[in-house]
Image (cartoon, helix red, strand yellow):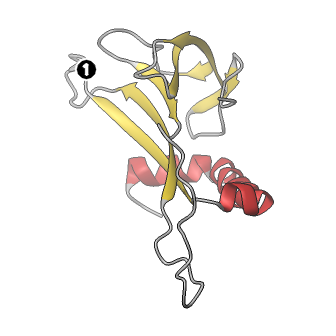
Amino acid sequence: MTMSLTSPVTGTAQTGLTSPTYTVAVDVAPDLNSRQYVVTAIGGTQSGVLSSSILMPFTITMFRPKQYKVQGTPNPVTGVISNVPKNVHKIIVRKGVDIDSTGDNHGNRVLISMTIETPAGSEANSPNAVRAALSLMIGALSQISSGIGDTITSGQF
């Protein structure tokens, strides 16, 4: 599995965070088809942001399919492959947050989840198209990272 992180991870621009970095260490993953990292230290200016603890976890986990699917078989008459299975990759971030103003560390977590579903067979037959789609998505997310944070925390576009 080549999805792996190098520490520290440089965060993207967010309102209220200056030059955010995250020192990560390999953590115990949920299963053999995943990798998990825990944030052990925070860099830059990130007021109120804590590294991982038992009550307030801060982790990132990357999953690959347990078994890769192959493209379906063509219809013998039409030649069309109508039932194409998908290979699903998933990345999740868990971050402990306070949910009320008491700051009692209720241990609740924000779960940010990104799922990437590729039609089986596209990985081998159109690898650059798959990479281009990923490139656009990740580049766009990086470009609008602060705006996403502003929208999520204010509810305004």
Q: Quadrant of residue 46?
A: top right
Q: Position of residue 141 (x, y in %)?
A: 63, 51
Q: Nearer the viewer, residue 151 or 68?
A: 68
**Vertically, is 6 above or below 115?**
above
Residue drawn at 25 percent across, 20 percent down: 107
Quarter of the N terminus within the rendering: top right
Q: Position of residue 128 (x, y in %)?
A: 80, 59
* Type of amino acid under label 1: Gly
Q: Is residue 34 left or right of residue 134?
A: left
Q: Nearer the viewer, residue 2 or 123?
A: 123
Residue drawn at 76 percent across, 57 percent down: 127
Q: Is residue 96 left or right of residue 11?
A: left
Q: Is residue 44 left or right of residue 150?
A: right
Q: Quadrant of residue 24?
A: top right
**Vertically, is 6 above or below 134?**
above
Q: Position of residue 21 (x, y in %)?
A: 65, 22
Q: Nearer the viewer, residue 23 or 150?
A: 23
Residue at the farthest front position: 76
Residue position marked by numbered label 1 in the rendering: 107
